[in-house]
Amino acid sequence: MFHNNIRGRFDQGDQAVVSAMQRFASLAARGREALVAGDFATLGRLIDENFDTRRSIYNLPRWQIAMVEAARATGASAKFAGSGGAIIGTYDGADMLEALRTSLAALGCRVIKPQVV
């Protein structure tokens, strides 16, 4: 089962899952604060912490972990954008963006830079 029975574990009071869900809530609130403040370094650290927290309670497929690790190897932050088919994160500058494109292309992935207006 993809979600590793997380809901059942939560309902049973599994402390690892309950703590992770509390951490996710805190990360979301702190991420919003960082985003509003324009503190992208903190936002990047929170993005990484989100993935690390997810990884601590889920049995994740190796190919999904590889995407995050490839992005992080360039210095970027990375986490799943949803249930694992794509990642999101932050990067610093054109050189890192090009490194991301190269690193992720080696895994058969492509990088899309959204236009925020």
Image (cartoon, grey):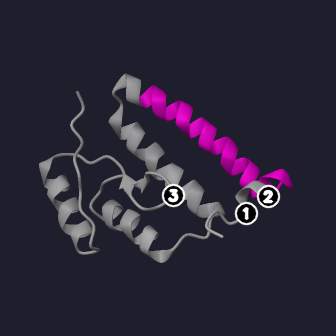
Asked whether 104 falls inside the magenta stretch, the response is no
Res 5 label:
1
The residue closer to the viewer here, 81 or 49, is: 81
Inspect the image, locate mark 2, and give the three-letter code of the amino acid beneath it: Gly
Secondary element at image label 3: loop
Q: Which residue is mark 3?
A: 83
Circles 2 and 1: CB atoms closer than 8 Å: yes
Residue at 18% x, 53% y: name it: 97
Q: Earlier in the sequence, mark 2 or mark 3?
A: 2
Q: Dot 2 surroundings within 10 Å: few (below 14), some, or many (20 or more)?
A: few
Residue 88 image offset from top left, x and y in percent: 37, 51
Q: Quadrant of residue 74?
A: bottom left
**Which badge, 1 or 3, comes first in the chain's sequence?**
1
Vertical order, 17 against 41 (above or below): below
Residue 112 picture location, percent across and down: 23, 52
Magenta stretch: give its range.
8-34
Residue at position x 60%, y 43% from top?
Answer: 24
